[in-house]
């Protein structure tokens, strides 16, 4: 029997305010629910075979399903179906004391919020009752539609599929001995590359098996059957074993069905109560076995096979999300809530267990709820090169500093998919060694190295960004042309950092071998559109694309990046020897102001060249020389930190954690970029010049990348893209009238 909340006459815990329906107390409650199975002062159940533990885990599963559905229906929005098919596994993890639970499925957010509510984590957001939970769901400054580290107790964001394993592996590496389970849907198994990422990580770090994929195999994705829905149980086992897993534990709800449900995927909530208990016991024991296996050195996966939508308003893909008609008055919603309703005493029992599990609320005990201590780097050994002296490779100069950071900070990791040597930073490999099971001094390989080199930008960016989010220093190195494949997770992490409730090291990148250097390789290696990505992200408030002028400037850029928190900083530089144009002091000023004047020659009229990049300065200096001889005044400004050149109102910096509101003021901007004409020059996307073009009032134009081609030299490629001194001179003359 189900009782509407307003008709219930017994005692109701305060936190239950807002619950629509209560169920009658189950007959077994008097014996199996008499006292919380997680005793006061304890962190977990004593045994996964204890009938009390099984019964109370089942109550937790019902509570999670009820809350997930009611919270979504309160806004007629959200995604209850996927999480509903995983609740027995999620509840089992909590009951076993594991609170560092992550997911790669953003659509499981309402379920995770329900768990954080039950363990009291959300009280840190003043969400103390179910009514508060309903009010704040999918609202600004509340519980956003997909997971974020902004929410107390939530370890990492979840939105795009195929990212959860990176966060779990990063956490496992930083916290040996602790378990980091992460749920993944059967629709996200191959999107983009979770298996290859796990395989390389396990080869590089064979002892770090303390992360546990929990596959929610429910037969459906967002709008249709999942692509692995036709696999047999044996084929699924073979898939995971074939990908290097040593322990694969599969619990199939079908094996416990006593209601003759059709199909390979069934709803466990339709079983008799005895069989529901049997299924819950199997999940609890299976999760316990999987956790112990992962913590004891075996690469392990736990698989729960149960129909999507089990126990909520619909089944299969139809359960995935709610539509506008799915309000709390909708018949399907009402009936589902009534089926899942539990007694007030059961709610109290579940909450007590969840609050005690793991030693307290996740908002207190999760590893991301405290700042990870960092080694003090002291003063880095910056080497100042003489202006107009011998040309230097900027990346190599930065590599010397990176090596020093790795020497001082043994947790520091450099990731690279295409090889550091090809980017002029072999000195990093030499100093820190490539992580590889084969020791080889010729290739600077060592099992204990600090350079992580999977042939996947997703895996490179994933581990580097994941470690930074978890509190550790990293550097992701990539060819500019290939980094685009790793940007989705980097963007996820930088957005998460913008709203994170704690300081963490910025996620830093070095992008080399720009399009202008890759002429002989053709357009496959010329993809500077990545710079348009950063140009758009600058307005986010915590993204700083840096374009060092030379080998002095790049050292200062890296030094600066290491001091920042909660930001995404990209350093783009050439791997060719180029002239030294700034002193260390000037380089520091350029970072602060956003740009620096490299050359100023007076004339009857003044044309200013705003140049982003190092190699692009070459044709500009040549054009300046010719213009000067004809009596035209020329100013060359190297734009190092374009984010500083926006107006404060252009950027959402105030909304960011660890906000940076430093922008170049109007008098300094006009002194630097003023004149009779302005020409913006960039070897990549023109969007990076937007801050300057927005503020300038003089006649202006831009020169930027157009498209790739195979050429023998950089000047020839520049000419193909109209980046020549002759074109620059002609444009200057035209603008000056």
Image (spheres, rainbow, N blue to C red):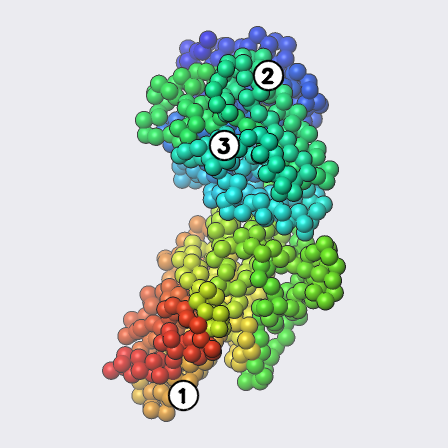
Comes first in the chain, label 1 or label 3: 3
**SS state under label 2:** helix
* Percent of width and height locating residue 587: 53, 73
Q: Position of residue 476 (x, y in %)?
A: 57, 59
For marks 3 and 2, give the one nearer the viewer: 3
Would you identify the image quadrant in which residue 207 lies?
top right
Mark 1 secondary-structure assignment: helix
Q: Nearer the viewer, residue 115 or 237?
A: 237
Residue 289 shown left or right of residue 547 in the figure: right
Rounded to the nearest angstrom, the CA distance separating label 1 from label 2 is 84 Å
Q: What residue is shown at x 39% (from left), y 28% (from top)?
A: 318
Query: Can residue 561 be seen by looking at this rendering?
Result: no
The answer for how far apart the CA atoms under marks 1 and 3 are is 69 Å
Q: Which residue is mark 2?
A: 277
User: Is label 3 in a helix, a strand or a loop?
Assistant: loop
Outermost residue toward the left in this view? 737
Residue 105 vertical placement versus 315 (above, below): below
Q: Are marks 3 and 2 in contact (CB under 8 Å)?
A: no
Residue at the disc numbered 3: 230
| Residue that appears at 58% across and 84% down | 390
Q: Locate the C terminus and report the quarter of the image it occupies.
A: bottom left
Q: Residues within 10 Å of mark 1 (few under 14, many from 20)?
A: some
Q: Nearer the viewer, mark 1 or mark 2?
A: 2
Residue 625 marker: 1
């Amino acid at each position: 029997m189900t009782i509407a909340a307003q008709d219930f006459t017994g005692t109701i815990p305060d936190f239950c305010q807002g619950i629509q329906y209560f169920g009658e107390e189950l007959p077994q409650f008097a014996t199996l629910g008499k006292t919380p199975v997680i005793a006061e002062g304890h962190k977990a159940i004593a045994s996964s075979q204890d009938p009390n533990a099984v019964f109370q885990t089942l109550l937790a599963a019902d509570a999670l399903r009820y809350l997930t559905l009611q919270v979504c229906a309160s806004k007629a929005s959200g995604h209850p179906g996927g999480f509903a098919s995983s609740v027995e596994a999620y509840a089992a993890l909590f009951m076993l004391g594991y609170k560092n639970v992550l997911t790669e499925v953003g659509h499981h957010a309402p379920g995770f919020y329900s768990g954080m509510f039950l363990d009291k984590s959300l009280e840190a957001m003043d969400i103390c009752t179910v009514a508060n939970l309903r009010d704040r769901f999918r609202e600004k400054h509340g519980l956003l539609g997909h997971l974020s580290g902004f929410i107390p107790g939530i370890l990492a964001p979840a939105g795009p599929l195929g990212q959860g394993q990176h966060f779990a592996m990063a956490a496992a590496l930083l916290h040996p001995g602790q378990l980091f389970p992460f749920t993944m849907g059967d629709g996200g198994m191959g999107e983009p590359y979770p298996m290859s990422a796990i395989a390389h990580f396990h080869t590089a770090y064979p002892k770090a098996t303390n992360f546990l994929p929990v596959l929610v195999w429910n037969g459906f994705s967002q709008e249709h059957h999942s692509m692995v829905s036709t696999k047999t149980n044996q084929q699924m086992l073979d898939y995971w074993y074939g990908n290097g897993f040593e322990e694969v534990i599969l619990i199939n709800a079908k094996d416990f069905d006593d209601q003759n449900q059709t199909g390979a995927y069934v709803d466990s909530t339709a079983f008799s109560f005895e069989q529901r208990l049997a299924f819950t016991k199997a999940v609890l024991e299976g999760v316990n076995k999987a956790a112990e296996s992962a913590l004891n050195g075996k690469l392990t996966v736990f698989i729960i096979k149960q129909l999507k939508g089990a126990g909520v308003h619909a089944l299969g893909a139809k359960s995935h999300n709610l539509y506008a008609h799915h309000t709390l008055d909708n018949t399907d919603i009402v009936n589902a809530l009534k089926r899942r309703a539990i007694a007030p005493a059961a709610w109290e029992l579940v909450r007590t267990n969840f609050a005690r599990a793991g030693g307290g609320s996740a908002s207190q005990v999760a590893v991301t709820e405290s700042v990870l201590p960092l080694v003090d780097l002291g003063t880095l050994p910056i080497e100042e090169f003489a202006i107009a002296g011998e040309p230097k490779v900027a990346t190599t100069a930065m590599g010397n500093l990176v090596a020093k950071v790795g020497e001082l900070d043994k947790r520091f990791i450099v990731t690279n998919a295409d090889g550091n040597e090809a980017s002029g930073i072999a000195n990093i490999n030499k100093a820190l060694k490539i992580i590889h099971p084969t020791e080889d001094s010729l290739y600077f390989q060592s099992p204990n190295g600090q350079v992580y080199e999977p042939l996947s930008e997703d895996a490179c960016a994933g581990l580097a960004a994941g470690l930074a989010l978890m509190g550790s220093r990293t550097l992701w190195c990539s060819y500019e042309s290939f980094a685009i494949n790793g940007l989705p997770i980097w963007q996820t992490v930088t957005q998460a950092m913008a709203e994170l409730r704690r300081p963490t090291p910025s996620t830093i990148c070095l992008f080399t071998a720009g399009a202008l250097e890759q002429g002989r390789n053709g357009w496959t290696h010329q993809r500077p559109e990545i710079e348009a990505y950063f140009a758009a992200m600058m307005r986010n408030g915590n993204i700083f694309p840096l374009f060092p002028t030379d080998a002095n400037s790049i050292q200062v850029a890296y030094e600066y990046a290491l001091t920042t928190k909660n930001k995404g900083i990209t350093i783009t530089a050439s791997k060719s020897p180029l002239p030294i144009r700034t002193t260390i002091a000037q380089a520091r000023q350029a970072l602060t102001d956003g740009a620096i004047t490299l050359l100023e020659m007076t004339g009857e009229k003044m044309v200013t060249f705003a140049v982003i990049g190092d190699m692009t300065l070459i044709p500009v200096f040549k054009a300046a020389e010719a213009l000067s001889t004809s009596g035209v005044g020329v100013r060359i400004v190297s734009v190092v930190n374009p984010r500083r050149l926006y107006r404060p109102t252009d950027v959402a910096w105030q909304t960011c954690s660890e906000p940076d509101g430093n922008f170049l003021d109007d008098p300094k901007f006009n002194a630097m970029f003023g004149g009779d004409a302005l020409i913006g020059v960039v070897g990549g996307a023109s969007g990076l010049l937007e801050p300057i073009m927005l503020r300038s009032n003089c006649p202006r134009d831009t020169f930027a990348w157009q498209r790739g081609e195979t050429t023998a030299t950089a000047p020839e490629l520049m000419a193909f893209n109209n980046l020549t001194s002759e074109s620059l001179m002609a444009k200057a003359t035209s603008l000056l009238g």
